[in-house]
Image (cartoon, rainbow, N blue to C red):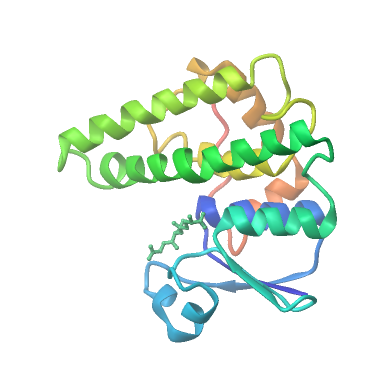
Amino acid sequence: MIDLYTWTTPNGRKVSILLEELGLDYTVHPINITEGDQNAEAFLKISPNNKIPAIVDHDTGISLMESGAIMLYLADKTGKFMPVDAKDRWAVTEWLMWQMGGLGPMLGQVHHFAKFNPGKAPYAQDRYLAEAKRLYGVLNKQLDGQDYIVGREYSIADMAVWPWISRFEWQAIDLNEYPNVKRWYNSIAVRPAVQKGYHIHKFTQDIPIPE
Ligand SMILES: N[C@@H](CCC(=O)N[C@@H](CS)C(=O)NCC(=O)O)C(=O)O
C-alpha cells in the first residue's frame, strides 16, 4: 500500500495520474499548501523540502519527495511507462528532466507573476511569459509526427508534462498556436486514469479543453 501526500496542483497530479494509470492501491493524504500543512513536523519527515507530492511505499519502506523521483520509482517498481529499449528509456529520462528543470519551474513563475500578480513586476512577467512560449514551441516540435513525447509509447514523460499544459489558460497560451501540443493534450485528457487522477484529492474544475 502506498500513501500519497498531495494537493490539487500540476506536481501533485503527475503522481496521482501515474498511480491511476498503474492501478495501484493508494491512500490520499491532502496537504493543504495554502494553509501551511507542508510545514508540519510530521510531513517534513517525509518531504524535507516542504513541498508536495511525496509518497511512502509500505511494501518497501521507501519514502520519497520530488515528483520526478517518485515517477521513476513507480515506473521501476512496476516495469510500466518506461521503455525497455535503452535509447527510448534515456529519451524519457531526458524529457522528464526537461519538465522537472525547465517547464515546471518556468510555468510556475508564469503563474506567480502573470496570473496572480499581474503588473507588479513587468520585467519578470514578460520574461516568464516569453519563456513559456519558447517551451511550448520546443514541445510542439518534439511532438511533430509522433503521438507521444517519446515516439509511440505513452510514458512517464507525458504524465509529467501534461498537468502543466492543463494550465494553459493561466499561462495565456493559445493552444491553436501549438497544434501538435493541442492534439497530444486532447488525446491524453480523455484517458480514464487521467480524468480520475486529475481530480485527486478533490474536484476543483473540469479538465480544461481548448477551443
Ligand atoms: N520539484 C518539486 C516541486 C514541488 C512543488 O513545487 N510543490 C508545490 C506545489 S505544486 C508545493 O508543495 N508548494 C508548497 C510550498 O512551496 O510551500 C517536485 O516536482 O515535486
For residue 65, side relative to residue 125 (left or right): right
Q: Position of residue 90 (x, y in %)?
A: 69, 37
Q: How many marks?
A: 0
Residue 118: in sight, yes or no? yes
Vertical arrangement, residue 173 with respect to residue 178, above or below: below
> Farthest front residue?
86
Q: Position of residue 153 (x, y in %)?
A: 79, 32
For residue 185, side relative to residue 136 (left or right): right
Pick the front one: 160 or 209: 160
Residue displayed at 75% across by 79% down? 58
Residue displayed at 77% across by 46% down? 192
Quadrant of the rendering where the C terminus is positioned: top right
Vertical arrangement, residue 19 with respect to residue 41, above or below: above
Q: Position of residue 183 (x, y in %)?
A: 65, 23
Q: Position of residue 99 (x, y in %)?
A: 53, 41
Vertical arrangement, residue 176 with respect to residue 169, above or below: above
For residue 109, side relative to residue 27 (left or right): left
Residue displayed at 80% across by 55% down? 22
